[in-house]
Structures are given as C-alpha cells and as structure tokens.
Image: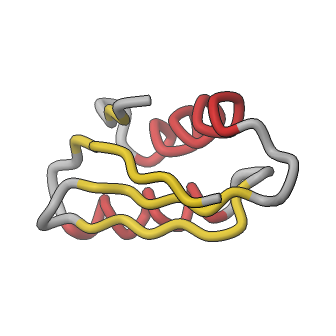
Amino acid sequence: MKKTYDIEVDCANCAAKMEEAAKHTEGVKDANVNFMMLKMTVEFEDGADPKTVMKNVLKNCRKVEDECEIAI
C-alpha cells in the first residue's frame, strides 16, 4: 500500500536525508520525498500498520531535521 503525506522541509539536501531515513524505517518498503511539492510518498510492507510506521518515520526524520513535520 502506498500513501502520500504533506511534509515541511527547508532544503533539498534535508529532503534527501529524510527520504533515506524513511527508507530505513521498519515497515517501509520504499519512500520518496518530493522537495518541490513538499510531499512524501511511502510504500508500506505487507501487514505493516501505516499509523505506527509513520510515527517511527517521523521520529527518524527528526533525527535529520528536528523541525520536520509530516501530516500523519
């Protein structure tokens, strides 16, 4: 399952780092951050709970940019 979320990120470099952080989160099959559109698309692994996974994605992204916001 794929879902798209609104995000707040300040620069393209941070967006790329957030994408990598999201990709390395348990339950995420793939992730893509579009800096220009301020969107994050996440493909979840089978059986993963999107709400739980996205809380962990947000936590991992905040390690990159502490002011990161994802509309979950």
Instruction: Please name whichever residue, 64 or 2, is drawn nearer the observer in this view of the structure.
Output: 2
Where does the image place residue 16, in percent across and percent down from the top left?
Answer: 37, 69
Residue 72 lies left or right of residue 36; in this view the side is right
Question: Which image quarter: residue 69?
Answer: top left
- Residue beneath the point at 66% across and 39% down: 50
Where does the image place residue 29, in percent across and percent down from the top left?
Answer: 71, 67
- Residue beneath the point at 63% across and 30% down: 51
Q: How many marks?
A: 0
Residue 23 lies left or right of residue 25; in this view the side is left
User: Residue pushed farthest right?
Assistant: 47
Question: Which image quarter: residue 35?
Answer: bottom left
User: Residue pushed farthest front?
Assistant: 1
Q: Which quarter of the figure is the N terminus placed in?
A: bottom right
- Residue beneath the point at 36% across and 42% down: 65
- Residue beneath the point at 59% across and 37% down: 54
Where does the image place residue 23, in percent across and percent down from the top left?
Answer: 62, 64
Q: How is the image coloured?
A: secondary structure
Q: Which quarter of the figure is the C terminus placed in?
A: top left
Where does the image place residue 34, in percent across and percent down from the top left?
Answer: 27, 68
Question: Which image quarter: residue 56?
Answer: top right
Instruction: Please name whichever residue, 43 or 16, is drawn nearer the observer in this view of the structure.
Output: 43
Q: Is residue 60 above or below residue 24?
A: above
